[in-house]
Image: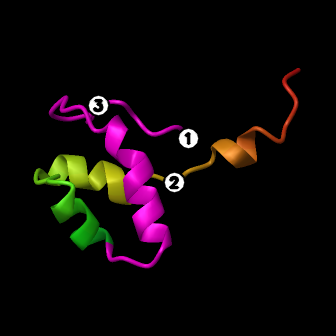
Amino acid sequence: MMFPVRCFTCGKPIGHLWGEYKERVGKGEKPKEVLDSLRVKKYCCRAVFVGNVDLIDDIAQYKKF
């Protein structure tokens, strides 16, 4: 699904960090180090990053009836 704009638990805006996180993890950096450098400290916000599965490209292949 799409990445949320805000953390589900605390409401902190995190949507603007998703692009950089995805890019850096894709290049091989460890998620912990990327989240530390992006200053994402709360465990609820970190869980949103680590637990997100990007399915938008898979869903976009199907027609809407």
**Badge 1 amino acid:** Met
Range of magenta residues: 1-30
- The quadrant in which residue 37 appears is bottom left
Q: Identify the mark nearer the N-term, 2 or 3.
A: 3
32 w.r.t. 19: above or below: below
Inspect this view and state whether residue 16 appears.
yes
Q: In the image, is 8 to the left or to the right of 28?
A: left
Q: Residues within 10 Å of mark 3 (few under 14, many from 20)?
A: some
| Discs 1, 3 touching: Cβ within 8 Å | no
Q: Quadrant of the C terminus?
A: top right
Q: Residue 53 — which label?
A: 2
Residue at the extreme top: 65
Determine the residue positioned at 23% across, 61% down: 35
Residue at the extreme left: 41
Inspect this view and state whether residue 51 appears.
no
Reply yes or no: does residue 6 show up in magenta.
yes
Determine the residue positioned at 44% across, 79% down: 28
Judging depth in this view, the residue of 11 and 65 nearest the camera is 11
Q: Identify the mark nearer the N-term, 1 or 3.
A: 1
**Badge 3 amino acid:** Arg
Q: Identify the mark nearer the N-term, 1 or 2.
A: 1
Picture coordinates of residue 33, whole percent (x, y): 23, 72
Picture coordinates of residue 38, whole percent (x, y): 21, 55
Per the image, the residue denoted by label 3 is 6
